[in-house]
Amino acid sequence: MGSNEFPQEQPVHAVTVKTFELGRTEVTNRQYRACVKAGACAAPDMNCLSPGFRGPDQPVVCVSWSQAREFARWAGGRLPSESEWEYAARGAGGKRRYAWGDAPPTCRRAVFGERAGALGCGRNATWPVCSKPRGNTKQGLCDMAGNVWEWTEDWYHDSYEGAPADGSAWVVKSTSSLRADRGGQWDGDAHNLRVSNRDSENPDIRSERGTGFRVARDLKKP
């Protein structure tokens, strides 16, 4: 896990990840609305959710870390740890730079700001989930690079010094009081799409730029 490219991605270290399952897609507006309708989730902040982000199959944004966690519980799961997220993005721990491999990002593989004036690959917003199948991991996970940042369970720390080595979330709070999110977003650059890239966000923030999430769960025994 990690890389030698930036201090926050160091040190590169071995992690033993227990078997788990991860949602194929980022949670969509349609799915999140079902949780709101059931009375288990608070609605997204509609003051920040402009029309271009409200499509039923676009990833939900304008939700806080706590709201993401509420949905995951309602759906029978949880948020992934940073270790689990990176393991999945690497194609079950492979040595690849991006979710699809080592080829450089283009709008054929991910939703991002490929160039000035082409944010969101020309839409200036997110795309419906799984719109870029060429960018899937070898297990078939969609949008592990781009579209929206994804909340993880972990508190964010400035490096991996002292990080758990068993794949669990880093529950020891850092001095920054930020949560770790992963994956890059529709208006970000290619640098953000690397599987080792780390970002942090105020857990209370709700933004359409934004942070969405996907659900993990422990593997159910037969």
Image (tube, rainbow, N blue to C red):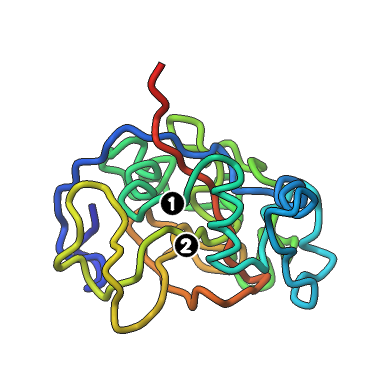
Q: Quadrant of residue 45?
A: bottom right
Q: Amino acid at mark 2?
A: Ala
196 or 70: nearer the viewer: 70
Q: Which mark is residue 172?
A: none
Q: Are marks 2 and 1 in contact (CB under 8 Å)?
A: yes
Against 85, residue 139 (above or below) is above
Report the residue that reaches farthest toward the top.
Answer: 222
Q: Is residue 192 left or right of residue 165?
A: right
Q: What residue appears at the point 47 percent right and 57 percent down from the top-left corner?
A: 183
Frontmost residue, 10 versus 4: 10
Q: Position of residue 219 (x, y in %)?
A: 40, 30
Which residue is painted at 52% across and 45% down in the image? 215
Amino acid of disc 1:
Pro
At x 76%, y 62%, the residue is 53
Judged left or right of residue 121, residue 38 is right
Crowding at dot 2, Cα within 10 Å, few <14 / some 14-19 / many 20+, comes out as: many
**Residue lying furthest bottom in this view?**
175
Quadrant of the snapshot with the C terminus: top left
User: How far across and down, in percent of the image, does residue 21 sit?
Assistant: 43, 34
Q: Position of residue 176 (x, y in %)?
A: 34, 83
Vertical position of residue 149 compared to residue 37: above or below: below
Q: Which mark is residue 104?
A: 1
Identify residue for label 2.
Answer: 190
Q: Tell me residue 77's x, y (percent).
A: 50, 42
Tally of numbered discs:
2
The foreground one among 150 and 185 is 150
Whole-number angstrom distance, CA of label 2 to CA of label 1: 8 Å
Report helix, strand or loop for mark 1: loop
Q: Nearer the viewer, mark 2 or mark 1?
A: 2
